[in-house]
Amino acid sequence: MSNIIVRNASLDDIKLLAELAYVTFWDAFHDHPANRPEDMAAYMAAAFAEEQIARELADDRNIFLIAEIDEEPAGYAKLITGSTEDGIEGERPIELSRLYSLQQFLGKGVGQALMDECFAIARSREHDVMWLGVWEYNPRAQRFYERNGFTVVGKHTFLLGSDPQIDLLMRKDIFTTENAE
């Protein structure tokens, strides 16, 4: 298997991140019968426009990671510091807002490499809790997060275009070397 490199994204990666976000979201959700094409199009046009990605990259609260295999983009992740939600308890929570792999790299360890780096960043910045929202109709992602120690603690609404959908809220305690037993 090829070596997976995970690196921090920079402002030079705006176009790449916009493309990764668009393609991976489309591949993950376009064929589910609950998702109307017009809602997918509306959400993706707003969330993954280069201008929006540029704003997010320029915001110090956001951390974008890009996974590469043989210098080819394979996936990405986005963390948001200082983000919380009702039902998420912790002194210093961090949100795992996105974690996606390109279809051709599913099952090749890209998601786990990104997840491991997200945990390392959370520990290095002394966050005590990582949380995320995962669509109720995405069992593959739910199993991945469960394998990584996340548990369901609630639900919230995610607006896909004009369609309010239910995300499961999941959380995991993050242990630093200072508070590990």
Image: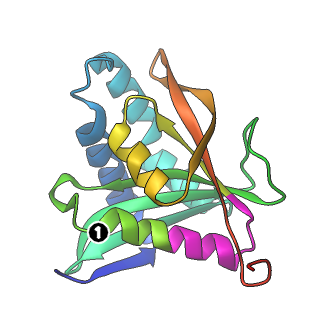
Task: Find out whether residue 128 is within the magenta segment.
Answer: yes
Q: Is residue 6 left or right of residue 72?
A: right
Residue type at mark 1: give it: Gly
Give the secondary structure at mark 1.
loop
Q: Which residues are magenta?
A: 117-129
> Could you say which is closer to the camera, residue 104 or residue 50?
104
> Could you say which is closer to the camera, residue 95 or residue 26?
95
Query: Is residue 49 visible in the rendered structure shown here?
Result: no
Query: Is residue 101 visible in the rendered structure shown here?
Result: yes
Residue furthest right in the image? 91
Q: Main secondary structure of the magenta part?
A: helix
Residue at x-position 26% and y-position 46% = 23
Residue 134 drawn at (x, y percent): 48, 39
Residue at x-position 64% and y-position 70% = 122
> Could you say which is closer to the camera, residue 55 or residue 168?
168
Residue 109 drawn at (x, y percent): 29, 69
Position above or below: 69 against 138? below
Task: Find out whether residue 120 is within the magenta segment.
Answer: yes
What residue would you read off at disc 1?
109
